[in-house]
Amino acid sequence: MGKMGGKGLSLARRLYTSRILGLVLGLLCVGVAMYPLNPAPWVWGLMLFNGLLWPHLAYQWARRAARPYHAEYRNLLADAFMGGFWVVAMHFNPLPSATTISMMAMNNVAIGGLRFLLAGSAAQVLGGGVGWLIFRPVLVPETSQLQLYACLPLMCFYPLALGLICYRQAHTLGQQKRELLALSRTDSLTGLLNHGAWKDQLEVEFQRCQRQQRGGAIALIDIDHFKSINDTYGHVAGDIVLRQLSKILNQNLRATDVAGRYGGDEFCVILPDLPLNSAATVMEALRDRFATLGYEQNPALKVSLSIGLAAFNPGHTDATLWLNDADQALYEAKSTGRNRVICCGGGRAHQQLLDSV
């Protein structure tokens, strides 16, 4: 079933309970208003059908329809039609009529906004016209005390039920929106921030460092000869290596550090309030552990990292320059043999050479 079908079934399920409650309470309101008018037996039968059976029939109709959303749309128009019909059948008794019209209007606005309010109002007018032809109503100018009490449950409980449904829907939509936002900012393979989300965080960190006159460092990490890993062992093995690195980053970085996948086999880390020499020590430990875990994963698979580090420079005017410093350090690490940590402007840091991949 398509997205529209799922949406229609969801709508039908939400309206099922509210329709049962509204029409049962509406049956009480209309029945008490109709009783003094001595309606024909078929009118009582129609009232009972509309109040007790129609909610279940409408739900089954929508549930079994090829296009549930459109079926439920027709059900709502049928509700509006019958609402207009009963207003005329009650001979425009003031309070029951006003209650019926206002509850229907509230329901239509909650379901489809102003556009559906207009469609529902047209259906109500049509239903009222049919009622006029049948009942030839004479205005009932007063509402009795019993009729007033019969309207109170519909006036009190139905808005509460409808408000609860709208709240739950808004809560669900809000939760889905947050989940979609998280997905849009997350790399699907590694679970880290994606390129755009990490750069947004870099801009935030750059502004914070400037504002608070605090230091920090960023690291660009490249998996050495990653294309050869894919070519030799396959893309599944390559994906395992990428996920392995993301796991190590999550396990070894501080809660305040921000890791992301910059693209392909490149990763990136923001290290707030960390001096460059301390950041180099952290990256060197990460490089060592990654190489060791790579050997454990597959003895024939040798992996290593090239890492470029750059400290926050108060003289830079934007975060891009900070990133360029880290990129230059990474380039130096790759061009001077790989498998090492290089700090921008600081030369090699804790350099340890392993067998090349």
Image: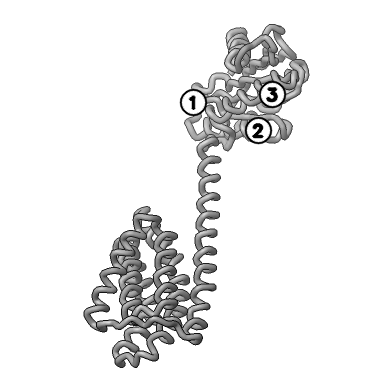
For label 1, the residue is 232
Identity, as a three-letter code, of the amino acid under mark 2? Glu
Q: CA distance from mark 2 to mark 1?
A: 18 Å
Which disc is residue 39 wearing? Answer: none
Q: Is residue 330 visible?
A: no
Q: Choose top left, top right, bottom left or bottom right for residue 323.
A: top right
Q: Could you tell which of marks 2 and 1 lies nearer the N-terminus?
A: 1
For label 3, the residue is 208
Identity, as a three-letter code, of the amino acid under mark 1? Thr
From the top left corner, tell me how far across and down residue 350 is, in percent: 74, 14
Number of marks: 3
Q: Colour scheme of this structure image?
A: one colour
* Relative to 114, 250 lies left or right: right
- Disc 1 secondary structure class: helix
Identity, as a three-letter code, of the amino acid under mark 3? Arg
Q: Residue at x 48, y 79 (%)?
A: 151
